[in-house]
Amino acid sequence: MATQLVEVEPFRMAVRDPFLEVLIRLVGEPNGAPTALHAYEATCAWWDEHAEGPTADELLDSMFEPTDWLAVIDDRKRPLSAQSAQLQLLRDWLLLYWCRLGAISFVAGVDIVVRPGSPALLAAEPRG
């Protein structure tokens, strides 16, 4: 059976979305694996310092500066309530992404604190 190469046009966004752009920069290579490793290390450091895990917000605030993401993400076209909803979606997606990579262990809606994942899983991730 022969295979045939199919060319597909690259995906293009019809409207610019600053929150999606930030998410893509954080998880896209070459930033994806190092950011996940940073989440793992920040979670371990939090446990070492506090003898318990950080909440999701504490983890994200410890990883990124400034902690006011809306001051950095320029999206003046949306009302503040919509920006806040987009920001929460972005933060939730980051946590799920790091869980899928094995960097952290956290079940949204169930867990109160974030636990470190496995560094062995992160070592298997290709680095850009």
Image: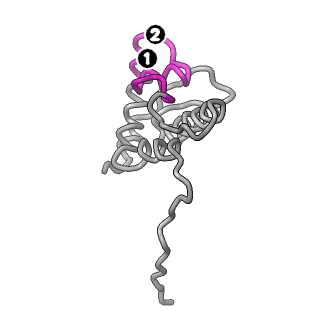
- Tags 2 and 1 in contact by the CB under 8 Å rule? yes
Image location (x, y in percent) of residue 124: 37, 47
From the viewer's perspective, is 122 left or right of 59?
Answer: left
What amino acid does circle 2 point to? His
Q: Residue at x 68, y 27 (%)?
A: 110
Residue 83 shown in magenta = no
> In front here: 88 or 46?
88
- In magenta, the rendered stretch is 44-70
Magenta stretch, overall SS: helix
| Residue, disc 2 | 50
| Residue, disc 1 | 46
Image location (x, y in percent) of residue 97: 52, 41
Gap in Å between the C-alphas at discs 2 and 1?
Answer: 6 Å
> In front here: 26 or 114?
26
Residue 50 shown in magenta = yes
Q: Count neighbours of disc 2 (C-alpha within 10 A) and say few if under 14, some if 14 to 19, many if 20 or more.
A: few
Image location (x, y in percent) of residue 102: 48, 39
Q: Secondary structure at mark 1?
A: helix
How does the figure colour the protein chain or chains? one colour
Q: Residue at x 36, y 44 (%)?
A: 31
Image location (x, y in percent) of residue 20: 52, 46
Q: Residue at x 38, y 35 (%)?
A: 37
From the viewer's perspective, is 32 left or right of 104?
Answer: left
Q: Residue at x 46, y 47 (%)?
A: 24
Residue furthest out toward the right: 109
